Structures are given as C-alpha cells and as structure tokens.
Amino acid sequence: VQLQASGGGLVQPGGSLRLSCAASGAPLDYYAIGWFRQAPGKEREGVLCISNNDGTTNYADSVKGRFTISRDNAKNTVYLQMNSLKPEDTAVYYCYARKGLRTYWGQGTQVTVSS
C-alpha cells in the first residue's frame, strides 16, 4: 500500500489544520492507521491511531481533546483534524498503515504553528 500525506502548512497558535492520508494499492479497511510526528531534535512521537476492526482510537496525552482521527474507507483516506494548535505541535507529521507485522509509511507533511 502506498500512502500520500497532505494538508500541512503554517498556522497561527489556536488555529486548525486537517491532514489527509490517501492510500493506493490496497483498501485501508484491513489496516490500523495512525500518525506519528517528529519535531526538530526530538524523537518520533506517536500521536494517535485508529484500529481497523472496531474503530478504537488511541491518543497521545499531548493531543487529547484537540486532535481527532477519522477514516473514510470509501475514499481510502484517513484524516487528522487538529484544533487549538500550539507551537509545540510543530513537526513533520507522518501517516502509517499497519497490518500484522508490516507497517507502511507515507512521506511527511510539515506543520508549523507560529505567530
């Protein structure tokens, strides 16, 4: 499966962005989907993910109440809605799809939160 992330950009603190992760080559129905991010000089951090069976979501404490993940299997796309953005959310965001022991990564999309 190939993943294409998009939607990053520059936003002011308190603003919103929606990232998209479009898949091709295989339906996402059977994959757990998630997002990681990596800020300059920091390790990659798991942000949130959604399961492929019952839609269970898991969020990092740092984004709870602000970020939402959703999936549209008909469009083979996963979305990351980010609200109330903070400067510390600045990072390159990567989407991934996981099935069993295999993980597929999209290219990153830069999110910069700055006034």
Image: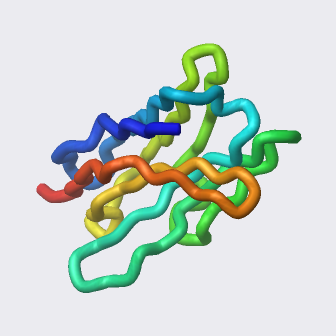
Tell which residue pokes out farthest to the right in this image.
54
Of residue 32 and residue 14, the one placed in the foreground of this image is: 32
In the picture, which quadrant includes the C terminus?
A: bottom left
Q: Tell me what residue is drawn at x 75 percent, y 37 percent.
A: 30
Does residue 12 appear to the left or right of 103 in the view shown? left
Q: Tell me what residue is drawn at x 29 percent, y 60 percent.
A: 92
Does residue 23 appear to the left or right of 111 in the view shown? right
Mark yes or no: residue 106 visible.
Answer: yes
In this view, 58 is above or below 71: below
Question: Which x, y percent locates residue 99?
Answer: 71, 51
Q: Tell me what residue is drawn at x 65 percent, y 53 percent.
A: 98
Question: Which x, y percent locates residue 112?
Answer: 20, 56
Does residue 95 appear to the left or right of 32 in the view shown? left
Of residue 113 and residue 58, the one placed in the foreground of this image is: 58
Q: How many marks?
A: 0
In this view, 96 is above or below 81: below
Of residue 57 and residue 2, the one placed in the foreground of this image is: 2
Tell which residue pokes out farthest to the left in this image.
115
Q: Tell me what residue is drawn at x 58 percent, y 44 percent.
A: 68
Does residue 22 appear to the left or right of 46 in the view shown? left
Mark yes or no: residue 66 visible.
Answer: no
Question: Which x, y percent locates residue 102?
Answer: 64, 58
Question: Which x, y percent locates residue 109?
Answer: 28, 49
Q: How is the image coloured?
A: rainbow
In this view, 43 is above or below 17: below
